Amino acid sequence: MEKEILEEITNNIGNNFLQRQENGLMLRKDQIEILNKYKIDFLKYNNIESLIYEIEEILNIEYYEDLDNLSIELSEFNYYQNTNK
């Protein structure tokens, strides 16, 4: 039982860390899973704005709550990381 709990904690921690992808984008494991679910090839985008635009194009056709939440997360991350304050 303790081993299962430890594995669950380890998996959750791994999902919460941003990891630099091959194309330079910073994404968490759970964000990548959502992108893969909707067959969005995030590796073909060289910046976060292009990825957000693609997500918004999909959401304009059909609404998916998890994809919408991801779009909001990425937009907030982009704002705080890339906006001069």
Image (tube, rainbow, N blue to C red):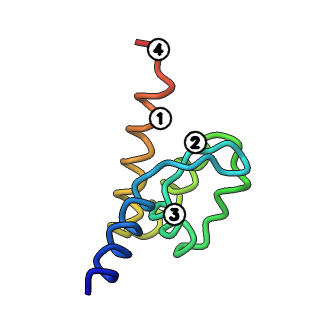
Residue 84, numbered label: 4
Q: Which residue position holds label 1?
A: 78
- The three-letter amino acid code for the residue at tag 1 is Asn
Q: What residue do we see at 34% from left, 81% from top?
A: 3
Verify CB contact (< 8 Å) between mark 1 and mark 2.
yes
Label 2 crowd bin: few (<14), some (14–19), many (20+), radius 10 Å = some
| Residue at mark 4 to residue at mark 1: CA–CA distance | 11 Å
Quarter where residue 13 is shown: bottom left
Residue 48, numbered label: 2
Establish if 6 lies above or below 70: below
Which percent across, then down, holds residue 83? 46, 21
| Residue at mark 1 to residue at mark 2: CA–CA distance | 7 Å
Verify CB contact (< 8 Å) between mark 1 and mark 3.
no
Observer-side mark, 4 or 3, equals 4
- The three-letter amino acid code for the residue at tag 4 is Asn
Q: Which residue position holds label 3?
A: 58
| Residue at mark 2 to residue at mark 3: CA–CA distance | 16 Å
Quarter where residue 79 is shown: top left
Q: Residue furthest top?
A: 85
User: N-terminal of the two: label 4 or label 3?
Assistant: 3
Which quarter of the rendered picture does the N terminus lie within? bottom left
